[in-house]
Amino acid sequence: MSFLLRRSITGTTRFLSASRYVSTTRPNTYYISHCLLLSQNQIPTFPSNLSFMREISTFSSSKDKKQQDGELSMGGKVSWVDVYLPRQVRPYAHLARIDKQIGTWLLAWPTMWSITLAAAPGNLPDYKMIGLFGLGSLLVRSIACTINDILDRDIDAKVDRTKRRPLASGVLKPSQGVLFLGFQLFLGLGILLQLNNYSRVLGVLSMFLVFTYPLMKRFTYWPQAYLGLSFSWGALLGWSAVKGSLDPAIVLPLYASGIFWTLVYDTIYAHQDKEDDLKVGVKSTALLFGDSTKEWISGFGIACIGGLALSGFNADLGWPFYAFLAAGSGQLAWQIWTVNLSCPADCSRKFVSNKWFGAIVFSGVLLGRLWS
C-alpha cells in the first residue's frame, strides 16, 4: 500500500512517500492506525523522528541480503535450514534439498521393499542394511539434486518454481556446486564400500543414470520413465546387498513396479511446471499426455500394483502382503482420480502423498514376510 503524507513543519510543506511499513521487532501500530485514518479521509500524523521510515529501509535491505546469502529458501519461505544452520552452509543445504525429504522417501522405499523381501521367511529384515540404505538414499538423492541443478541452472532460472535455487539464482557459482558434488560423491563411496562386490558394481552403474537423467528432458517426452530407472534401482541393489546376487523372478517385477510408480507420481509432479516447460522448451510426460494424463497414469498404476503382486507371489509372501497391497491400490487410485492437474498446489500435495503409498507397501512386505 502506498500513501502520501502531508505535514507542515515550520511553515514549510513537505511530501513524504513510503511503501508499506513492515516491522519485525514491534507491532505495526502506526501502520494500522494510519490505514484506518486514510480510510476515513483523515490526514495521519507520525512521530517526529520518522523512525518508521528507517525500519522500511532496514527491512528491505535485510531481505535483499538474505536472498544474496541464500538465507531464504528456494520457495521464498524460511525453512529450518535458514533458522538453525550457519549462513555459509545454507546454500549448500538448499542445493542438497535436506529440508525437503520427499525425494529421499521415494528413492528409499523400493530399496526397503527389496531388503525386506530378501529376509528369511518368518524373520525381520537386516537392520544394518535398512540403516545403511536409508543413509545412502539420503545421500544419493542429494547428489542427484546437485547434478540436476548444475546441469539445469539456466533452465531453472526461467522457471518460477526453481528460479530461487542456489545455482539458478547465482548464490552459488557452478564451480562451488562441482566441489560440493565431489564431497558428496566421496561420502557416497564410503557407504558403497560397506557392500559386497556384486552390489558395488550395481551401485557404480546406477551413477550413470543419476548423472544423465537431467539431460533427458531436452531430448525426450519420457524423462519420467528415465527417472524411474534411476529411482527404482534400489529394488535391485537392496536384494543383492543381502543375497550377493539377483533373483530375476522377484527383483525384475519389483523393479518394473517401481518404474511404473515413478511414472505416476512424477507425471503428477510435472504438471506443476507444464506452462514454464512449454516456454523454455523442455519435455515431460505431462506435456505429452495432456488431457489424457489420468488415463495414462491409471494404466501405470495398475501395472505398478501388478508388478508388486507378482514379486510378492514369487517371494512366497503371506496373505497380509495382499491386504496391504489392496490398501495401497486404494491410496494410489485416490491420488490419481482426485488430483487437480490444473492446480500446482494440489499436484504437489498428491505427489508428496506417495510417501504413504511406499509405507503401506513396505508394511505389507514386512508382515507378509513374517507370516510366510
Image (cartoon, grey):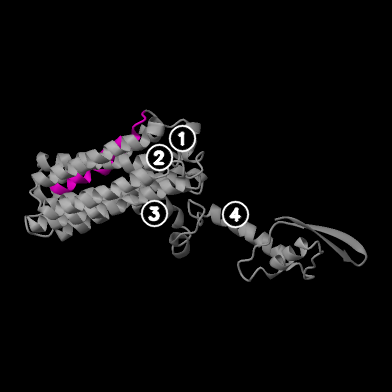
Q: CA distance from mark 4 to mark 3?
A: 24 Å
Is residue 188 at all visible to an observer of this figure? Answer: no
Quarter of the image with the N terminus is: bottom right
Is 372 magenta? The answer is no
Q: Farthest residue toward the right?
A: 11
Is residue 165 at all visible to an observer of this figure? Answer: yes
Picture quadrant where residue 64 is located: bottom right
Residue position for label 3: 100
Which region of the structure is painted magenta?
220-239
Q: Nearer the viewer, mark 3 or mark 2?
A: 2
Residue position for label 2: 270
For the point 22% across and 41% down, which residue is it?
A: 257
Q: Looking at the picture, which amino acid does disc 4 mark?
A: Asp
Position in image of residue 282 (x %, y %): 43, 32
Q: Looking at the picture, which amino acid does disc 2 mark?
A: Ala
For the point 41% across and 48% down, which residue is it?
A: 348
Is 238 magenta? The answer is yes
Q: CA distance from mark 3 to mark 1?
A: 22 Å
> Earlier along the polypeptide chain: callout 4 or callout 1?
4
Label 4: state its secondary structure.
helix
